[in-house]
Amino acid sequence: MTTPVTDKIDSLVKENKIMVFMKGNKLMPQCGFSNQVVQILNILGVPYETVDVLADQDIRQGVKEYSNWPTIPQVYINGEFVGGSDVMTELYQKGELQQMVEVALAS
């Protein structure tokens, strides 16, 4: 992976309390898994940013290497990789995601 791509991903992750690398964007998700993540974050009513990996192949591949996670979407909270839609759904159902988000937004 090239350094500029790594640097770009790294700065996006660090500059945004909640960062989602997904197919599409929060207004128009382009796959069911990305839509699931958007729905969860919208239910929580928290601010978050998205990057459409379909618009940038370098980011699409780079984020997989950055996180060592093979699938999209990828969610980062407070600079830490959390997981994809399955992990987000599980954390939300357990009530743990709300706590993670509150801590991130308070810091």
Image (cartoon, rainbow, N blue to C red):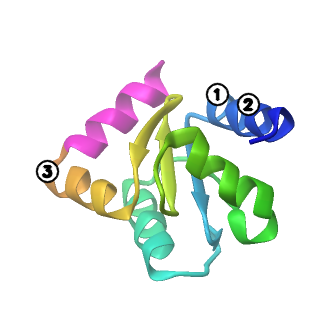
**Residue at 18% over, 47% down:** 95
**Residue at 53% over, 29% down:** 79
Real-space Cα separation, disc 2 to disc 3, in angstroms: 30 Å
Real-space Cα separation, disc 1 to disc 2, in angstroms: 5 Å
Residue 68, position as x, y percentages in the image: 49, 43
Which residue is denoted by mark 2 in the rendering? 11
Name which residue type carries label 1.
Lys
Q: Is residue 52 above or below residue 30?
A: above
Q: Is residue 92 visible?
A: yes
Which residue is denoted by mark 1 in the rendering? 14
In this view, the residue in front, 59 or 85, is: 59
Real-space Cα separation, disc 1 to disc 3, in angstroms: 26 Å
Name which residue type carries label 3.
Lys
Residue 15, position as x, y percentages in the image: 69, 30
Which residue is denoted by mark 3 in the rendering? 94
Name which residue type carries label 2.
Ser
Asked whether the residues under the numbered discs 1 and 2 touch, taking CB atoms below 8 Å apart as contact, a structural biologist would say yes
- Which contiguous range is marked in magenta? 96-107
Residue 27: in magenta span: no
**Residue at 57% over, 51% down:** 64
Callout in the foreground (2, 3): 2
Q: Is residue 10 above or below residue 63?
A: above
**Residue at 37% over, 26% down:** 103
